[in-house]
Image (cartoon, grey):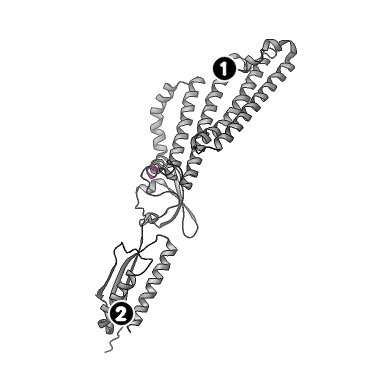
């Protein structure tokens, strides 16, 4: 490549220093031209709406720069080979270093491409403007990106091993026996890994969801889902770190995915207000049916319920047209206050617990 631009035969008479100076100059000039070309290409990519060309450009910039510098260094070593006698600069070692460099830089490019594509797709997801972004949620995207990066690293290591003289077949034979021992030693780690995998595949919750478990004293907002553990911030603003294997054995509720919030209240009247019960129930039904913050497509029930020890009770079941916690309580408060006004308008009162003491 660069050797064709300037033959070493033409530099042989200039001495070692002049040859090295020429190699360094050509290398730096080549890097400058390549980076300038990528800069111009990047301006063109910024004008497009395609996600992949931006990710490809950003991923290629650093590996290409290192490739030019390392190739220039190896060329300088070849130039020095005639002046410095050492096994370090042998043709075999240089060839080995070239192969390892190529493997590492290709792996670096792929890892950077996956990371940049992940970032771009998440941006598109937020803007709701990319076709693919609307099909993948952030949790699945993070999991897929992690899996692809891990696959690239493992593949690069397996490809590099024969180059270093390590036999893969012998390693696999050892892995069959050693894998059993490692499996026993790392069974908790593996359980957490597969627990995380199940979370990514089944998606019972994702980052930002509010979850709770009736089996454990667990409630809060999911901040991160890793391969080993999940972090949840509770309402005291403490962060709880939970091994992923725990989620395979507990019930998890995800209130973030509810479509409505239910208002269910039991209200007791005095026994002397029994003749007014049906009138109050009908007025409450009318109030709820006209309430602007109640979803009238959902079930609404208002009925006389029971004769209690100190009261006669009626109950209401209806659904607020919101899933937001604070807004739900505002709607519930308004409904309860209007029920109180209806009871007062009917000259009735809400009962309070009474106790009768019998003295002998």
- Asked if the magenta segment contains residue 26, the reply would be no
Within 10 angstroms of label 1, few (less than 14), some, or many (20 or more) residues?
Answer: some
Per the model, the C-alpha gap separating discs 2 and 1 is 92 Å
Image height of 219 relative to 317, above or below: above
Q: Which residue is mark 2?
A: 269
- Asked if the magenta segment contains residue 204, the reply would be yes
Please tell me in which quadrant of the rendered image residue 25 appears.
top right
Highlighted range, magenta: 198-207
Within 10 angstroms of label 2, few (less than 14), some, or many (20 or more) residues?
Answer: many
- Residue 352 visible somewhere in the drawing: no
Q: Nearer the viewer, residue 239 or 188?
A: 239
* Residue that appears at 61% across and 24% down: 68
Residue at the extreme bottom of the image, as rendered: 360
Image height of 76 relative to 44, above or below: above
Q: Nearer the viewer, residue 195 or 152?
A: 152
Image height of 339 relative to 155, above or below: below
* Residue that appears at 52% across and 25% down: 103
- Residue 101 falls left or right of residue 131: right
Quarter of the image that includes the C terminus: bottom left
- Residue 60 visible somewhere in the drawing: yes
Q: Which residue is mark 1?
A: 95
- Find numbered disc 2 in the image and state the secondary structure of the residue it sits on: strand
* Residue that appears at 68% across and 19% down: 23
The location of residue 44, given as percent across then percent down, is 57, 34
User: Tag on residue 261?
Assistant: none
The location of residue 341, given as percent across then percent down, is 37, 78
């Amino acid at each position: 490549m660069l050797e064709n631009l300037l033959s070493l035969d033409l530099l042989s008479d200039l001495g070692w220093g002049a040859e090295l100076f020429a190699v360094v100059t050509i290398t730096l000039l080549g890097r400058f031209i390549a980076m300038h070309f990528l800069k111009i290409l990047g301006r063109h990519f910024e004008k497009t709406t395609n996600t992949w060309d931006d990710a490809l450009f950003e991923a290629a910039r650093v590996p290409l720069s290192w490739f030019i510098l390392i190739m220039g260094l190896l060329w300088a070593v070849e130039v020095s080979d005639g002046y410095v006698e050492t096994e370090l600069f042998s043709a075999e070692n240089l060839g080995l270093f070239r192969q390892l460099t190529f493997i590492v830089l290709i792996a670096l490019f792929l890892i950077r491409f996956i990371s940049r594509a992940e970032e771009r797709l998440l941006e598109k997801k937020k803007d709701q403007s990319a076709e693919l972004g609307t099909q993948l949620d952030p949790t699945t995207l993070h999991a897929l990106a992690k899996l692809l990066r891990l696959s690239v690293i493992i593949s690069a290591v397996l490809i590099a091993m024969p180059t270093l003289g390590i036999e893969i077949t012998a390693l696999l034979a050892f892995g069959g026996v050693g894998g059993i021992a490692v499996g026993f030693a790392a069974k908790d780690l593996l359980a957490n890994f597969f627990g995380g995998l199940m979370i990514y595949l089944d998606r019972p919750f994702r980052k930002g969801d509010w979850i709770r478990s009736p089996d454990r004293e667990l409630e809060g907002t999911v901040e991160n889902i890793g391969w080993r553990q999940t972090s949840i911030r509770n309402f005291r603003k403490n962060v709880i770190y939970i091994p992923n294997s725990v989620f395979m054995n507990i019930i998890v509720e995800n209130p973030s995915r509810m479509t409505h919030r239910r208002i269910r209240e039991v209200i007791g009247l005095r026994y002397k207000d029994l003749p007014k019960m049906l009138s109050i129930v009908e007025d409450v039904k009318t109030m709820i049916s006209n309430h602007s913050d109640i979803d009238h497509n959902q079930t609404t029930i208002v009925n006389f319920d029971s004769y209690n020890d100190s009261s006669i009770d009626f109950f209401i079941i209806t659904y607020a047209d919101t899933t937001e916690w604070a807004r739900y309580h505002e709607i519930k408060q308004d409904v309860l206050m209007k029920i109180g006004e209806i009871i007062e308008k009917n000259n009735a009162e809400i009962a309070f617990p009474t106790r009768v003491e019998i003295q002998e």
